[in-house]
Amino acid sequence: MYRINMAVLLVLGLLLVTAKQSTQMSLRNPSAEIESSNCKLATLRVGLVLASDTNEKALLDSGLFTPDSDNPYVDHVGRRFNIGKLGSTPIVYVKTGTFSVNVATGVQTLLNKFTISEIVFFGNAGSLNKTYVPGTVLVPEAVAFTGVWEWKEFRAQNKGQLAFGHFSYPDMNGENTLGTVAYENITLYSPTEDPEEVFWLPVPLPEEAATVKLTKGLRFKECRSGRCQTEFETFYGSKASTSDFYLKNKAYGEFLVGKFSASTADSASAAVALTALSNEKPFVVIQGVSNVVGVDGSYPELASQNAFQVAAAFIGLLPTQRLACE
């Protein structure tokens, strides 16, 4: 038996407020305006975001998604936006493609094209330490772009920054002329606030739900390879690292843990967070661990299926509504 703990209600509390606010908005049908007598019927939907074919396969294999019978999808600017329900909740899901620029573009297009109440993102990530094994699911409280660098001197000298010479592999005795880089902030734009320079992008959670716990059983996919665990858990409140390279170097993983207390690394989560925050849209990031940095073995299908199980549980708790105009 596994538990979706207080983070579920934290997100739920925020989304309930957002749903109430959204009832005051004029909504459009996500694919076409459907006439019913003299009234246009509009649906508020959850935006489900995923990056890869493996993620999409986990969604479709679950049997939980039912395409809309009249308008099952919309093709727009090179992407397919799939319209339907996950269980009883109206959703639109999009496969953005990997790496942050594709993810951010896909999420922004989703928000521009459809009437979205909140964003639920699930995907795969690498664990930066052996605490989180393949198959584990994490719901971070903050994510950051750790691939935004400023190049410094062409020698490894500053241990407070990222000195490549300190991470020479397999020999740390030679000089590394790649030099040193300093991590940079990014600019968070918002329609109602002044631009702000930030490093961490918070996942906003309301404090009023902090004392409530919700228990729900999840049947995670088992690892049958004999090379990873057969029992997994969901962890909340971690920090996640996003950059546009696949992290394999164990020493660099240890640097991210020591410098930023990051638990995972991927190429998508911060792009989802930045786009959602810029649009003032509630969101949650759900990561399935596919591998451990510096350890042989990768299990992307296992990670995707377990992450989707948690995503589906979140979506099942969200408020749904169908709004009609006069």
Image: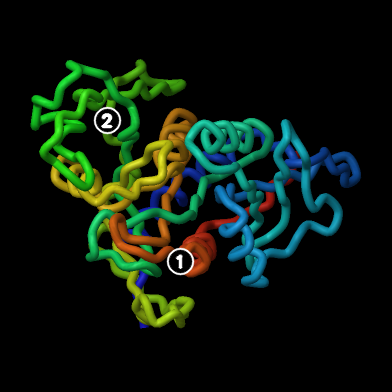
What amino acid type should be assigned to the residue bearing mark 1?
Tyr
What amino acid type should be assigned to the residue bearing mark 2?
Phe
The residue under the point 26% across, 19% down is: 151
SS class, disc 1: loop
**Residue 129: % across, % down:** 23, 59
The residue under the point 59% across, 43% down is: 97
**Residue 187: % across, % down:** 35, 21
Above/below status of 76 relative to 47? above
Residue topped by disc 1: 299
**Residue 128: % across, % down:** 26, 54
Picture quadrant of residue 26: top right
Residue topped by disc 2: 199
- Front residue of this view, candidates 247 and 232: 247
The residue under the point 54% across, 43% down is: 98
Above/below status of 309 relative to 236? below
- Front residue of this view, candidates 281 and 43: 281
Quadrant in which the N terminus is drawn: bottom left
**Residue 219: % across, % down:** 47, 80
Above/below status of 23 relative to 250? above
Image position of 228 (left or right of 43): left
Q: Nearer the viewer, mark 1 or mark 2?
A: 1
